[in-house]
Image (cartoon, coloured by chain):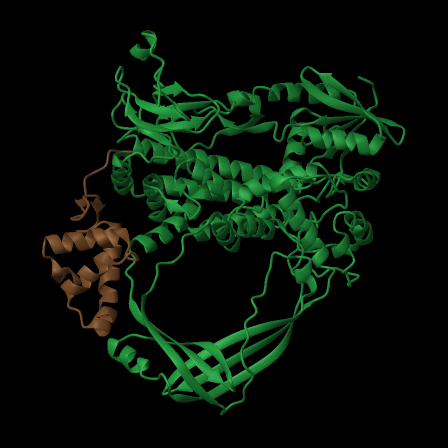
Amino acid sequence: MSKPELSGKKGRCIVCGEVAEGDLCFKHERALEELRSKYTSWKAAFGYNVQEYLMALQKRKETGEWTKELIAYIVANKRFEMLT
Amino acid sequence: MHEGHVLVIAEKRDAAKRIAQALGGRYVERRIGSVPYYETTWMGKRMYVAPARGHLYGLDSDVKDRSLFPVLDVEWVPLSEVKKEDRDISAHVNAMRVLGEGASDIIIACDYDIEGETIGYNIVKYLGLIRGEVKRAKFSTLTTQELRESFASLLVRKEWRMAMAGRARHFVDYIWGISLSRMVSSMAAQVKRATLSIGRVQGPTLVELMNRESEIRSFVPEPYWQVKALIEVNGQEVEMEGPRLYTAEDAEKAKAIKGKEGVVTEFKEQEVSLQPPPPFNLSDLQREAYRIYGIQPWSALRVLEGLYLRALISYPRTSSQKLPPSINYRRIISGLSSMYQREAGMLTRDKPVEGSEDDPAHPAIYPTGEVAKLFGEEYKLYDLVARRFLATFSKDAEVTRRALKVNVEGLDFSANGQNVIERGWLEIYRFRSIEERPVPSAKEGDVALVKDVSVDLSYTRPPARYTPSTILDWMEKNELGTKATRADIIETLYKRGYIADRNIKVTGLGMAVARFFANSRVITLNMTRTLERDLEGIEVGNVSPEKVLMESVKVLMQEVGEGGSRDELLSLYSAYLKEPVKVRGLSIGKCPVCGKGELIVRRSMAGKRYLKCNSCGASAPLPSKGRLVSAKAICPHCGWPMVRRGGWVFCPNLNCPGKKAGVLSAGK
């Protein structure tokens, strides 16, 4: 039988502050992957740059809430390079 | 007790009463303490038919310290020793003991499945009743005829494979449930003490729900333009669907095809016979009940069990889609004809249409032919079973299907249509419909003229949320749980607050627990499925119970040793605790006691209404009748939000100083 040990602190997500392996927790890491992979279709459709792409996504009701949280962070901190 | 009597062990009281009535025609109800039993005579023998109350024995452990895990030291004990609410089980155990003394024969007449077999086996084992042969009654309905036939040809239990499989399943579920729950609870206790329960099958199910939740919450839509056109072919207009376009430039070009001519590239027409659907097994019936009436799978099962106990339908916990001739089709149809006269007159087949799935223990669910006045969900589900049964004896539906393809300026358009020629079984099983849509007849090379065109900008959508019905399907496809337990597992996830809503959302708490399991290298879907197959293997004699138990203990020890992802669990659990309290039910206003929660109108089990704060638990009684709404005013004496019922506005606070002063209510 065992009792659990106390946890050691790991990295924190730059968006929400939850435990993260790298800079992002699993939620926002996944949202970032999605953002990166879908950009090409928006660029092909409307010729948007990254900033325009993110602003358009913020307005869409289909966009997931974790993605919107990440977009808010990127826009507020001007971290557009995260998508490249 | 009379020496030489026969003890018949039934699973529930209603079943015991029916068995006694069926065997002897008349019976006498007697009691041992608070427990009734039924005395009757069958083939010259005195029979005591005694009801269990489901399981009388369950697993328990002496290791009560909740911080200790894994828990492997468990034993079967009367359930009255495990849970306070099962105290009256001891009366049932005592009654069985008394009735078992001096019995010349023991007959187990519990439901013929793993659980029923385990219930019966545990009773005879722990009361020392396996003195000689133990007999088993096998039946699928509680009708007089079938019960009599079953008791006239009793099976003899020598091997107890079904019971062994049931006991092994209980053991595995218990040690996994208690150990994993203690492990995650102990981890979470570093943030706040709470019991986070999770089980062997619940874990992977919750992970699947979380995966879908993650997909939805991280979704990024993609734009596209959907082209549709109204096209005239051979003088007849038809709405046709065109391609999806992915650039604004292509979309503009597509708009220009209005008024242009194209050509028919393909036309197909075929007559199709649609066979009636097979008779229901439990999963199919739960799915249809949810699709048609929105009845939750676990509620459907409860209602079906009630119908079975009233001998109106056969045993519902079955995987079979087959109806053997031994159930006597003619007798059932004749019995149903008083209620389904028109439908019974439309039957054309001698044998029913059957599906591929089978179950060694029971046939598909069918109506017994006995009818009764039913209401609400009972009626709805009975009607589904009866119509589906009748439909399997009726004609195929005949449909003409047409598929038309047209190309205009390089863009492909298509339209599919169908036309019902003969409704056949659709007349009886009216819960399926075929949407008729006319498509003109054509041949390859015919000219097509675009009368109108629409090019609409759309966006891809996130995947649909699971519903209780679709997650049940997923569990079945992935062989998680059994037909009898799947619905209960989903209900448990709701009760524990891990999931919410009809279109299932995973809560913050559910997310914390699910992530813990998602990170596990030991508890995988594959491992759970293998264990499930091994448990089934015990029943058919392919695997020994000892091997399965040892294997499952080994895997559990491995999981406990790995310890899972503790930091993420703690982080998500902390975040969940900070989430605002969700308001469920009618809120009257902010709670003046804690200032955080809302005062929600609730109803007790006894039907009385009261207000309860969803944060601190402060409560106050309310009138039981009448429509209550917030009066949108604060009591000037105590600060509680006022409640309105019709023209009466009052303060719900029992200790309101205004009440002491005789100011009971304010007028309009």
Residue located at (35% from left, 31% from top): B587
Residue located at (31% from left, 71% from top): B224
Residue located at (77% from left, 52% from top): B341
Q: Nearer the viewer, residue B338 or B103?
A: B338
> Relative to B79, does residue A54 appear above or below in the rendering?
below
Question: Is residue B111 at least partly visible in the picture?
Answer: no
Drawn colour of chain A? brown
Question: Is residue B51 at least partly visible in the picture?
Answer: yes
Q: Quadrant of residue A16?
A: top left
Give the residue furthest to the left.
Answer: A78
The image position of residue B453, as x and y in percent, is: 37, 78
Q: Nearer the viewer, residue B351 or B608?
A: B608
The image position of residue B583, as x and y in percent, is: 34, 35
> Relative to B181, does residue B409 appear above or below in the rendering?
below
Q: Nearer the viewer, residue B11 or B660?
A: B660
Chain represented in green? B
Q: Where is the N terminus of chain B found, in terms of image quarters? A: top right
Q: Nearer the viewer, residue B221 or B132?
A: B221
